[in-house]
Image (tube, grey):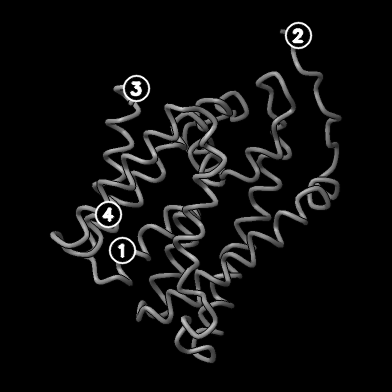
Amino acid sequence: MPESAPQPVVRSYRQVALAALPASIAVGTFAVSIGIVARAGGLGWTAPTVFSAATYAGASQVAAIGVISGGGGIAAAIVAGILVNLRYIPVGISVASCFHGSRLRRFVECQIVADVNWALAHQGGGRYDRRILLGAGVMMWAVWVIGTIVGLALGGVVGDPRRFGLDALFPAMFVALLVPQLRSRRSALTAALAAGVALLAIPFVPPGIPILLGSLAVIVGGRRGV
């Protein structure tokens, strides 16, 4: 197949900001929702804020906060977050050529790679625009942290998020992440296996463990070609 034609290169950080603005609004809205739910779950101010600043991974935070809010332990929350974020291994490999300089510099820069700025930076044919990757990444990181803090502040006003349906945020987020991946019979069967394992485990194990078992089922099922 012919290689995809590269998209126009964005030449200034102002253009990067304008290109990333619609996605940043969505990211900020989601961060506010996470802050509200985290505050309602009794996680206080410090932990969710540091979590957003240091981890900067929506799906991972959804998994971890969901486990803790549901009564699960810290260990289960950490493992859930790690399993969800395993997808960043191939993502990181795909953009490795965008990072230059010392190991420390590359380590710092790669921390802001997330789904949205990774997708925005793709130029076609496996090429990525470094300026978009980093510029949009910094912008969205700032929006993510600020949004979390705003959500934490609103959490004290909103109270119980179930009154507004915000308790459905986490399952809705996972469904939104899942649906685009169901492009083949194999992926659909793997997702069904994970859901089945998690549902069967709910009555028998502590909160947080079903999501871990479901995530492990995805890994096992994917490797074996379920």
Mark positioned earlier in the residue sequence (2 or 3): 2
Single out the mark in the foreground, 4 or 1. Answer: 4
Q: Are marks 3 and 1 in contact (CB under 8 Å)?
A: no
- Quadrant of the drawing holding the N terminus: top right
In the image, residue 94 sits, relative to residue 23, either above or below, namely above
Picture coordinates of residue 104, whole percent (x, y): 47, 38
**225 displayed left or right of 103:** left
**1 displayed left or right of 33:** right
Mark positioned earlier in the residue sequence (4 or 3): 4
Residue lying at the far left in this picture: please name it.
204
Residue drawn at point x = 44 percent, y = 31 percent: 187
C-alpha span from label 2 to label 4: 44 Å
Of helix, strand and loop, which one carries label 3?
A: loop
C-alpha span from label 4 to label 1: 15 Å
Q: Amino acid at mark 1?
A: Val
* Between 158 and 104, the one nearer to me in the picture: 158
Category of crowding for the residue at label 2, using alpha-carbon neighbours closer than 10 angstroms: few (below 14), some (14–19), many (at least 20): few
Of helix, strand and loop, which one carries label 1?
A: helix
* Between 169 and 81, the one nearer to me in the picture: 169
Mark positioned earlier in the residue sequence (4 or 1): 1
Category of crowding for the residue at label 3, using alpha-carbon neighbours closer than 10 angstroms: few (below 14), some (14–19), many (at least 20): few
Q: Which residue is mark 1?
A: 67
Q: Amino acid at mark 4?
A: Leu
Residue lying at the far top in this picture: please name it.
1
Single out the mark in the foreground, 2 or 4. Answer: 4
Q: Which residue is mark 2?
A: 2
Q: Which residue is mark 3?
A: 225
Picture coordinates of residue 131, whole percent (x, y): 73, 38
Q: Which residue is mark 4?
A: 199
Mark positioned earlier in the residue sequence (1 or 2): 2
Residue drawn at point x = 17 percent, y = 62 percent: 203
